[in-house]
């Protein structure tokens, strides 16, 4: 896969579709590599007339790692945030948003449709209010606003996601299979083969759990985005699973309340993932929302 130097770091990426089509940048979530956006899903979007770009966020996959920052104490950071104390982080969501814009700069793309999932949705939100002239439309999937008064995820889902990842391959794969099962969409059959293949390929490409911890600290430190989200003026689509156990659907509803003119698509039976059964509807919704753009 190709890579570029952007915003002072190396970013690994790949693309789908015709480069003359409108760009659609896909932003992955916490600890996830670009493969989160399945090739088949990316090709589905490309067939709808988009130049689809997926990339590794900093501290994930094959993009620049921040080893020199060390591994922060996550629980101490959570306690500090709950106490209203300032957090120290190796970088911010603003930095991660600037990475995405740096990638667009390196590719010679002036404006793009931005779509992110989970933490990637938060980064996409930051891109939209931090770089409004570069954004054609925003899609925020299974994400939230940073509103501290919203319901938290189910304890068993949070515990599974935050549990330390084993170092050995076989144990790691089983650990992550358990995570997938905890956050999976209850309205869809569990995709055992797809999940296992994805986890194995992710481990072989880049086993780097410490990056996810630093990304999580950046997420927490970002705080409540609602005042800045209210400034977003591009067509915005918010997609959320009705049965999301990690970021409850109230996060999506809150996002729609705050962003002027935002539209909400609640997916019945969907959890904190994107089963194949929702790909078509999500791709159609993204394309429809992008079509509301005034270029």
Image (cartoon, rainbow, N blue to C red):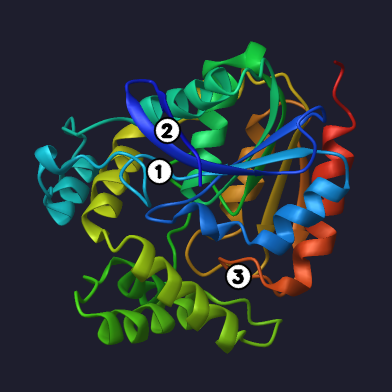
- State the SS at label 1: loop
What whole-number distance in Å separates the C-alpha atoms at marks 2 and 3?
A: 23 Å
Residue highlighted by disc 2: 224
Q: Is residue 226 visible?
A: no
Residue depicted at x 29% and y 35%: 221
Please say if 178 is above or below 149: below
**Circle 2 or circle 3, nearest the eye:** 3
Circle 2 residues within 10 Å: few <14, some 14–19, many ≥20: some
- State the SS at label 2: loop
Q: Nearer the viewer, residue 160 or 67?
A: 67
Q: Nearer the viewer, residue 80 or 96?
A: 96
Q: Is residue 158 left or right of residue 277?
A: left
Specify which label sits upstream in the sequence, 3 or 1: 1
Q: Position of residue 277 (x, y in %)?
A: 77, 74
Residue highlighted by disc 3: 271
Circle 1 residues within 10 Å: few <14, some 14–19, many ≥20: few
Query: Image quadrant of residue 7?
Result: top left
What whole-number distance in Å separates the C-alpha atoms at marks 2 and 1?
A: 7 Å
Q: Are marks 2 and 1 in contact (CB under 8 Å)?
A: yes
Residue highlighted by disc 1: 148
Q: Position of residue 281 (x, y in %)?
A: 84, 60
Residue depicted at x 40% and y 52%: 30
Specify which label sits upstream in the sequence, 2 or 1: 1
Q: Position of residue 68 (x, y in %)?
A: 10, 38
């Amino acid at each position: 896969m190709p890579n570029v130097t952007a915003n002072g770091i190396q970013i690994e990426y790949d693309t789908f579709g015709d480069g003359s089509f409108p760009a659609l940048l896909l932003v992955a979530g916490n600890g996830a590599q670009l493969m989160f956006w399945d090739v088949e899903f990316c090709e589905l979007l490309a067939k709808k007339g988009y130049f689809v770009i997926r990339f590794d966020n900093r501290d994930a996959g094959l993009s620049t790692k921040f080893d020199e920052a060390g591994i922060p104490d996550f629980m101490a950071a959570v306690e500090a945030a709950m106490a209203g104390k300032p957090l120290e982080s190796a970088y911010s969501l603003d930095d991660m948003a600037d990475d995405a814009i740096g990638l667009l700069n390196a590719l010679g793309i002036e404006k793009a449709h931005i779509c992110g999932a989970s933490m990637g949705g938060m980064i996409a939100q930051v891109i939209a209010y931090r770089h409004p002239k570069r954004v054609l439309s925003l899609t925020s999937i299974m994400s939230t606003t940073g509103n501290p008064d919203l319901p938290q995820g189910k304890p068993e889902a949070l515990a599974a996601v935050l549990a330390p990842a084993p170092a050995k391959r076989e144990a790691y794969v089983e650990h992550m299979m358990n995570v997938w099962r905890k956050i999976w969409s209850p309205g869809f059959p569990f995709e055992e083969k797809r999940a296992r293949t994805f986890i194995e390929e992710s481990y072989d490409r880049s086993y780097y759990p410490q990056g996810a911890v630093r990304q999580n600290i950046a997420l927490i430190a970002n705080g409540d985005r609602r005042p800045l989200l209210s400034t977003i003026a591009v067509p915005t689509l918010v997609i959320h699973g009705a049965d999301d156990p990690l970021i409850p659907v109230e996060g999506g509803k809150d996002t729609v309340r705050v962003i002027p003119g935002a539209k909400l698509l609640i997916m019945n039976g969907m959890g904190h993932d994107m089963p194949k059964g929702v790909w078509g509807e999500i791709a159609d919704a993204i394309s429809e929302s992008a079509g509301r753009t005034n270029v």
